[in-house]
Image: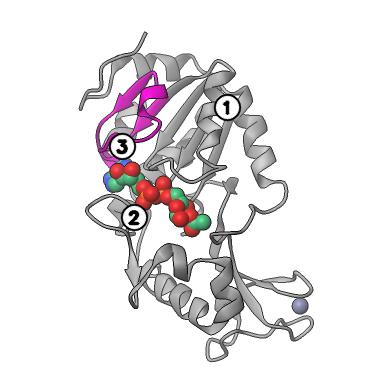
Amino acid sequence: MKTAATRDTPEEVRTRLRAARSVFVLTGAGVSAESGVPTFRGGGGAAVWKGMPFYEISSAGMVERDLPEVWAWFDYRRGVLKTLRPNPAHATLARWQDRFAEFTLATQNVDGLHRAAGTREVLELHGNVWIARCMSCRARADVRELNDEERPPACPDCGSPMRPDVVLFGEVLPAGVFERAAARAAACEVCLIVGTSALVYPAAGLPELAKQMGAFLVEVNPERTHLSALCDVSIKGRAGEILPRLDD
Ligand code: OAD
Ligand code: ZN
C-alpha cells in the first residue's frame, strides 16, 4: 500500500530501517545541495557554463573537439568544490555503513563528498572529479598531484594527454561498477533514493531493479520525481534534514 507523501519522517520508514539487514542507497546531486554544490536540474533551470549547457560541455564529443575546455570546466567545478564540506546527509550515510549488516552506497555524484564524510566504500557510478585518467594507457592520477598549468596534463607514465575520470554524456559507465551496484540493489530489503531527479540511466534503473526484487522503496527529495510513483514512501524534504531523523 502506498503511503501518502508527507513532510514528516514517516514512522513506517524508521520501522523498516530498524528491521533491515540489507540497505541500498542511491544518491544524486541533491544530497550535496545543502553543502553548496549546484544541482544540474530543478530549482528553475539547467546548469550553464560559458553559454554551454552542462550536457554539451560534459560530453564525449567535447573531449574530442576541445579537451582543454573540458579541463577548464572541471577546474571550475573543482574550484567550487574545494571550499565545500559534507553535510548531515553525507554524515548520516557514513554512519550507516556500520549500522546495517549489509550497506551499499552508490552515487551519481563526482564531488567526493561521501568519502570526505567517512564512507569507506562508495560506488561512484559517474567517476570522480579529483581523478585524471590517461587517454592511452589508462593510468590514473590525483589531479592535485599533476601540473595545474598543463591542460590537458600529461600522463606521468606515458606522457599522453589525460582527461577527467568522469562519465560524460555519450559514454558508458566504468567497467564493473554498475554491475556491482545492480547486484547489491537486487539483494537489498530497503532502497533509499536521495536527491536525484532519476532521469539519467542506467543509474535510475537501480531503484527500479530493487523494487522488482521486492525491496521497500523510499525517496527523499523536496520535489516529485520520475520515480515517486514507484516508491512506497516519498518523503518531501531536504536530505540534510530528513536523513538524520531516520537515524535512530
Ligand atoms: P539533478 O540535478 O538532475 O537532480 C537533483 C535532484 O535533487 C532534484 O530532483 C532536486 O529536486 C533534488 N534536490 C534538490 N535539493 C535537495 C536537497 N536539499 N535534498 C534532497 N534533494 C534535493 O541531479 P542528478 O539526479 O544527480 O551526470 O543527475 C544525474 C546525473 O545527471 C548527474 O550525475 C550528472 C548529470 O548529467 C553526469 O555528470 C554523468
Ligand atoms: Zn599514460
**SS for dot 2:** loop
Pinpoint residue 14: horizontal percent, then vertical percent: 36, 19
Q: Where's the N terminus, which quadrant?
A: top left
Q: Secondary structure at mark 3?
A: loop
Nearer to me, 11 or 191:
191
Q: Residue at x 63, y 31 (%)?
A: 184
| In this view, 28 is above or below 63 | above
Disc 2 under 8 Å from ligand 1? The reply is yes
Q: Quadrant of the C terminus?
A: top left
Q: Which mark is residue 236?
A: none
Q: Position of residue 194 (x, y in %)?
A: 39, 38
Picture quadrant where residue 82 is located: bottom left
Spatial CA distance of label 3 from label 2 is: 12 Å
Query: Dot 3 surroundings within 10 Å: few (below 14), some, or many (20 or more)?
Result: many
Q: Is residue 156 magenta?
A: no
Please state the extent of the stretch shown in magenta in the rendering. Answer: 218-241
- Is the CB atom of the residue marked by disc 3 within 8 angstroms of ligand 1's nearest atom? yes
The numbered disc on residue 39 is: 2
Specify the quadrant of the image occupied by residue 60: bottom right
Residue 240 on the magenta segment: yes
Q: Answer with mark 2 or mark 1, whichever residue precedes in sequence.
A: 2
Q: Point out the tag, 3 or 1, that comes first from the N-terminus.
A: 1
- Disc 3: which residue: 221
Q: Which mark is residue 209?
A: 1
Three-letter code, disc 2: Thr
Q: Label 1 is placed on what type of residue?
A: Leu
| Contact check, label 3 and label 2, Cβ < 8 Å | no
Q: Residue furthest bottom?
A: 149
